[in-house]
Image: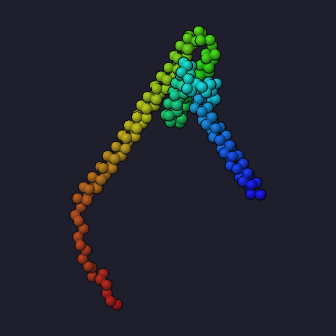
Amino acid sequence: MTALLVIIAVLAVVGGAAVAAVLATRAVKSNYERSNQVVPGFTTAAPSAWLGSHDPEARLHRRLIDAIKALHANQQFDTFGTYLDLRVELEQQAVAIDNELVAVAAIPLAQRDAPLAKLTAAVESIERAVGELAATSAQNAADQLQRTLDGLRERTSTLEQARAALDEIEESTPPPTQATEQPGSAAEGG
């Protein structure tokens, strides 16, 4: 009976370890596949091997991933209408370029140069657009911050003027005199 319980316990531990290993493997694989997506949430046709490959298509694929990550790092692209529209358009273009990279990878090596040159220029244009949009949104944010600071300074200045006026009133008003007892105000016994 004891031997049976030991065997069951060992099987439970081994089975639990196997289940944990399978779940951990799935989580790692899922994270790896997500890191290969040009746009988060959109599956890519690019092979996972491109994350570590030195092939030109793979490097361009990773540059697209980095450009879109930079785009997503700026939260203004998530909230403002114009910026949101631009972000979506850039994401769609990046996915289309990535799909073309996958197609070019299937072409014989001798015929890849011209398509790769065009795709390199397209990736560079995406990177440039992301950089320009980030600079523009940063400038807009700086302008917004400057307007906020100007308003704050104006309110602070108004508050300081009000305090100065109160100080002047306090300085020009004589201090109150000691009140003397009025007849009938003293506590009378009775």
Q: Position of residue 50 (x, y in %)?
A: 58, 24
147 left or right, relative to 65: left
Whether residue 96 can be seen here: no
Identified at 69% across, 46% down, the residue is: 14
User: 15 or 63: nearer the eye?
Assistant: 15
Identified at 73% across, 51% down, the residue is: 7
Residue 172 against residue 142 in the figure, above or below: below
Q: Quadrant of the C terminus?
A: bottom left
Q: Quadrant of residue 114?
A: top right
Residue at the limit of the structure toward the bottom, as seen here: 190
167 left or right, relative to 61: left
36 left or right, relative to 124: right
Identified at 49% across, 23% down, the residue is: 127
User: 21 or 71: nearer the eye?
Assistant: 21
Residue 134 against residue 177 in the figure, above or below: above
Q: Position of residue 177 (x, y in %)?
A: 23, 70
Residue 8 against residue 105 in the figure, above or below: below
Q: Quadrant of the N terminus?
A: bottom right
User: 190 or 148: nearer the eye?
Assistant: 148
Q: Position of residue 109 (x, y in %)?
A: 59, 12
Identified at 25% across, 59% down, the residue is: 170
Residue at the limit of the structure toward the top, as seen here: 110
Whether residue 116 can be seen here: yes
User: 44 or 58: nearer the eye?
Assistant: 58
Q: Position of residue 66 (x, y in %)?
A: 51, 28
Q: How many numbered marks, from 0 up?
A: 0
